[in-house]
């Protein structure tokens, strides 16, 4: 592991208790391991979002700018979403 830098953080009591439980149950050996795992998860999530933006969103946005006629009017999209929602609510008898 690379050289560690010591940091001090304040956490809400619920988060501190969660870390303590993870260590107490043996899921992690130390609270530092819990924090490192959480940061790795955040890094993975951020990298996934960045990939999605670069690989999916940017090409679609560029295609829409190149040919705006490809767009579907918002009213059409919202109408379809409302109809789908109404159909699902009817199928579930309105129970949530």
Image (cartoon, rainbow, N blue to C red):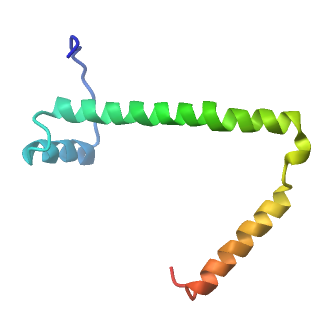
Name the quadrant containing residue 35.
Answer: top left
Name the quadrant containing residue 59.
Answer: top right
Residue under the image location 52 percent in, 84 percent down = 95
Residue under the image location 8 percent in, 44 percent down = 26
Residue under the image location 41 percent in, 33 percent down = 44
Q: How many callouts does the rendering have?
A: 0
Q: In the displayed image of the protein, which residue is found farthest to the bottom?
A: 93
Q: Is residue 64 left or right of residue 43?
A: right
Q: Is residue 10 left or right of residue 86?
A: left
Q: In the displayed image of the protein, which residue is found farthest to the top?
A: 3
Q: In the displayed image of the protein, which residue is found farthest to the right?
A: 69
Residue 92 in picture, x, y percent from top left: 55, 84
Q: Is residue 77 above or below residue 43?
A: below
Q: Is residue 33 left or right of residue 45?
A: left
Residue 41 in picture, x, y percent from top left: 35, 36
Residue under the image location 61 percent in, 78 percent down = 88
Q: Quadrant of the N terminus?
A: top left
**Which of 21/28 is in front?**
28
Name the quadrant containing residue 76.
Answer: bottom right
Q: Is residue 84 above or below residue 19?
A: below
Residue 77 in picture, x, y percent from top left: 78, 61
Residue 90 in picture, x, y percent from top left: 63, 85
């Amino acid at each position: 592991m690379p050289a560690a830098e010591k940091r001090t953080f304040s956490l809400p009591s619920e988060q501190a208790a969660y870390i303590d439980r993870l260590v107490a149950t043996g899921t992690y050996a130390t609270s530092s391991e819990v924090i490192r795992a959480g940061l790795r998860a955040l890094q993975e999530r951020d990298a996934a979002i960045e990939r999605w933006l670069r690989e999916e969103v940017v090409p679609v946005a560029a295609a829409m700018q190149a040919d705006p006629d490809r767009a579907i009017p918002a009213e059409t999209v919202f109408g379809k979403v409302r109809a789908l929602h109404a159909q699902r609510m009817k199928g579930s008898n309105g129970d949530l």
